[in-house]
Image: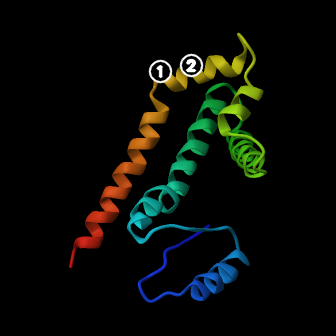
Amino acid sequence: MTALAAGQAATKDDMAMAQHIFNAVGKTVVVKEDQMDAVTGLSGSGPAYAFIMIEALSDGGVHMGLSRDTALTLAAQTLQGAAKLFLRGEKHPGQLKDMVTSPGGTTISGIRVLEDGKIRGTLMAAVEAATMRSKALGTQE
């Protein structure tokens, strides 16, 4: 994943060429230069957040009797599959969540625990903290 920001001297042709190059190896987004710290807070630090989720999900599986290897594989493949499904671009993540959440079922029971633990607010706060740290590092000389 690459985020590009046009500097003052960059032309539209320069940006098109940069996008063409980076699209050869992944996805590219164009953001304003003052948004690059937010890109760092989300996308630059995001793999660590995902690794923590994989580790935590696998810990839950181990706690419930799965072997570590099986739990790690299940957790990683689950996140990969969910991401791939979302990246098809057909539905909002909330709609996809609703598609796998039945009334009174196992998923909604787990979601309630995640919400009680403020997972959304915690993830948002992590992105904010990483963004603010990126800004602070950018002002150091």
Whole-percent x and y of residue 57? 61, 36
Classify mark 2: helix, strand or loop.
Answer: helix
| Residue under pointer 1 | 116
Q: Residue furthest top?
A: 104
- Which quadrant of the figure contains the C terminus? bottom left
Q: Amino acid at mark 1?
A: Asp
Disc 2: which residue: 112
- At a point 79% along the width and 51% down the height, the residue shown is 88
Q: Residue at x 48, y 79 (%)?
A: 6
Q: Residue 30 sits in which quadrant?
A: bottom right
Query: Percent x, y for residue 3?
Result: 55, 69
Taking 40 as reference, is 96 above or below it?
A: above
Q: Is residue 30 left or right of residue 45?
A: right
Q: Are marks 1 and 2 in contact (CB under 8 Å)?
A: yes
Q: Quadrant of the N terminus?
A: bottom right
Q: Nearer the viewer, residue 25 or 90?
A: 90
Along the viewing direction, whichever of 112 and 4 lies nearer the viewer: 4
Amino acid beneath label 2: Arg
When asked about the image quadrant of residue 132, the answer is bottom left
- Establish if 38 lies above or below 122: below
Q: What residue is at 54 percent from the left and 21 percent from the top?
A: 113
Mark 1: secondary structure = helix
Residue 50: percent from left, percent from top: 57, 49
- Viewer-nearest residue: 99 or 105: 99
Tell me where residue 34 appears, x and y as whole percent.
38, 67
- Residue 74 in the figure: left or right of residue 133: right
